[in-house]
Amino acid sequence: MRRSDSGFVTAEAALVIPALVLFAGLLVWALMAAAAQIRCVDAARAGARAAARSEPAGAAVAAAEAAAPPGARVELSRTGDLWRVRVSAPAPGPAALSVRLTALAVALAEDTVGPPP
């Protein structure tokens, strides 16, 4: 090894290690955001199922809020024969990476299914 090469490995490591730590942190954040998105989808489905079973609106919203991630907002509406539940929540993690996660579920109201009276 030549004398002029001494110290290059240390300099390269000093540059690469922080970049790898940042990359690993972003991967962890992406995993947490994906898990929160899945919880939003599950919460919207739970709320839509409860509303479709003709449960009171408060019970449907409570079912969605129980399955939603912390800080989620649940919106319930009915258009014709369809119940729509929208769940939106902030992604977990630092505020600098503020991403809003949203899921929408639609269910047919059970009181509209079946032969006419």
Image (cartoon, rainbow, N blue to C red):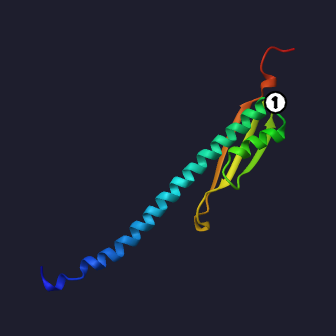
Q: Quadrant of residue 22?
A: bottom left
Residue sticking out furthest to the left:
1
Q: Position of residue 20 (x, y in %)?
A: 39, 66
Q: Position of residue 6 (x, y in %)?
A: 20, 83
Q: Amino acid at mark 1?
A: Ser
Residue 114 lies, with reference to residue 80, above or below; the image says above
Q: Position of residue 99 (x, y in %)?
A: 61, 59
- Between residue 89 and residue 83, name the one nearer to us: 89
- Residue at point 35%, 75% (across, down): 15
Q: Position of residue 87 (x, y in %)?
A: 70, 47
Which quadrant does the N terminus fall into? bottom left
Residue 87 lies, with reference to residue 8, above or below; the image says above
Instruction: Tell me: 100 left or right of 22.
Output: right
For numbered disc 1, what is the local secondary structure?
Answer: loop
- Between residue 79 and residue 28, name the one nearer to us: 28
Residue sticking out furthest to the right:
117
Few, some or many C-alpha atoms within 10 Å of disc 1 (few <14, some 14-19, many ≥20)?
some
- Give the tally of numbered discs: 1
Instruction: Tell me: 86 left or right of 98.
Output: right
- Residue at point 80%, 40% (across, down): 77
- Residue at point 76%, 31% (across, down): 52
- Residue at point 44%, 62% (across, down): 24
Which residue carries the number 1 mark? 54
